[in-house]
Image (tube, rainbow, N blue to C red):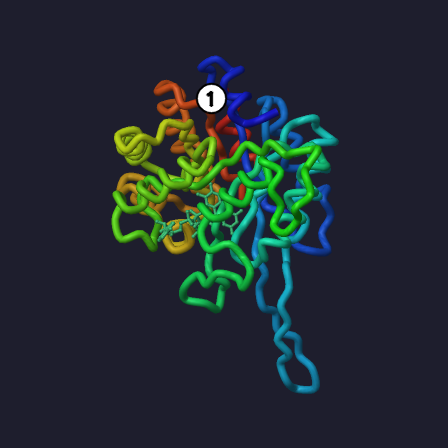
Amino acid sequence: MKVTDHIKEAKGKTLFTFELIPPKKGNSIQELYDNIDPLMEFNPPFIDVTTSREEYIYIEKGGLLDRKITRMRPGTVGICAAIKHKYNVDTVPHVLCGGFTKEETEYLLVDCHYLGIENVMALRGDAMSHQKYFEPTKGGNEFASDLVIQIKNLNKGKYLHEVIESTSKSDFCIGVAGYPEKHIEAPSLDFDLKKLKQKVDLGADYVVTQMFFDNKKYFKFVEEARKVGINVPIIPGIKPIAVKRHLQLLPQVFKIDLPEDLISEVEKCKDNKEVRQLGVEWCTEQSKELLKAGVPVLHYYSMGKSDNIKAVASKVF
Ligand SMILES: Cc1cc2nc3c(=O)[nH]c(=O)nc-3n(C[C@H](O)[C@H](O)[C@H](O)COP(=O)(O)OP(=O)(O)OC[C@H]3O[C@@H](n4cnc5c(N)ncnc54)[C@H](O)[C@@H]3O)c2cc1C
């Protein structure tokens, strides 16, 4: 079932969902199941699985370092199929521009269609770790909007090269990313909103936001988005802060600000156990306020262990 249909069917009740990162190559999928199991009691109608682009690794060979390119966390579509099968929930694989040719993307989308996966998140992805700026992959999509076009074309039975009439068309529901604090590369929030509107006008069905720790930023973002005519559901993405180092890591990796109150509370914590508890309390308050405001879905970023998300969900749902 499509994400947008789940929202319609909920008739105004806020849904609980979360997203997972595939394990590093060589690790068991059981790790993921162990994190999903405790969250199933909150009835997530869909679960997102992220995609990581390729990266360089260095292997010592005869005193020299040999540079190889590899994907350390492969398997997004396979994991989506496994979760769908095991838990009977819908899954949303994240599909990236960076690191994939359009041909590879088509291959992946065809797999999703065969597997009965009806939703995809269309994302550009970031630069590779050694690059300063995002460089489009040769033969790949440049912006998420180009990826939305490719997916919409496939929904119409239009493949990259074939002229064959399609008899079994996909009908993907498409999610895209939105940034309450503006995407780092956008020259202004207005510019970024115009680009978000472009993704929606091209066929995106819903938006999931970058994480934020101050709900005012989300409410303002939704208000501005509605003003420019973005009328699809805007799902807030949130995360409980878990370790002291997040004070530096979250702004660095996700290009977001943290509220002063949260920073000073984290700084007062004696150890990471206290930070984890504080993170749960902060995220619970955020969740309760968002729920009261009638958001369609609360989407939790689970980057590892899910005990803190369970602690939040049990106080909110
Ligand atoms: C909910 C969510 C899930 C994510 N999941 C993943 C994941 O699984 N894997 C991963 O690697 N990353 C993921 N990301 C991170 C995301 O890939 C990065 O934030 C990336 O830098 C931007 O992706 P985008 O899809 O927003 O890009 P785009 O929408 O393409 O925008 C990128 C930048 O280009 C600008 N822009 C857009 N179109 C144009 C245009 N036509 N001309 C000029 N400028 C333009 C935008 O304003 C923006 O600054 C996720 C982010 C979010 C919010």
Tell me if residue 108 comes above or below residue 221 in the rendering: below
Q: Is 22 in front, or is 280?
A: 22
Q: Residues within 10 Å of mark 1 (few under 14, many from 20)?
A: some
Q: Quick check: 65 above or below 126? A: below
Instruction: Determine whether the residue tagged by mark 1 lies in a helix, strand or loop.
Output: helix
Q: Position of residue 272 (x, y in %)?
A: 46, 46
Quadrant for the N terminus, please.
top right
For label 1, being within 8 Å of ligand 1 is answered no
Residue at 60% over, 31% down? 171
The residue located at (54%, 57%) in the rendering is 140
* Residue linked to disc 1: 316
x%, y% of residue 19? 55, 38
The percent coordinates of residue 290 (x first, y second) are 37, 25
- Give the residue displayed 57% in from the left and 57% down from the top: 53
Tell me the quarter of the picture where residue 231 sits. Answer: top left
The answer to whether residue 279 is visible is: no
Number of dots carrying numbers: 1
Residue found 59% across the figure and 45% down from its top: 21
Is 146 placed above or below 172 here? below
How far across and how far down the image is residue 13, in percent? 47, 15
Q: What residue occupies the far bottom of the structure in this picture?
A: 63
Judge from the rendering whether residue 214 lies leftward or rightward of residue 55; answer left or right: left
> Can residue 242 be seen from the camera position used here?
yes
Q: Hey, which quadrant is residue 90 in on the image?
A: top right
Q: Nearer the viewer, residue 33 or 237?
A: 237
Frontmost residue, 134 versus 184: 134
Left or right: 149 as drawn, with respect to 283: right
Give the farthest residue toward the top: 11
Left or right of residue 303: residue 36: right
Work out whether 243 lies above or below 82.
below
Three-letter code, disc 1? Val
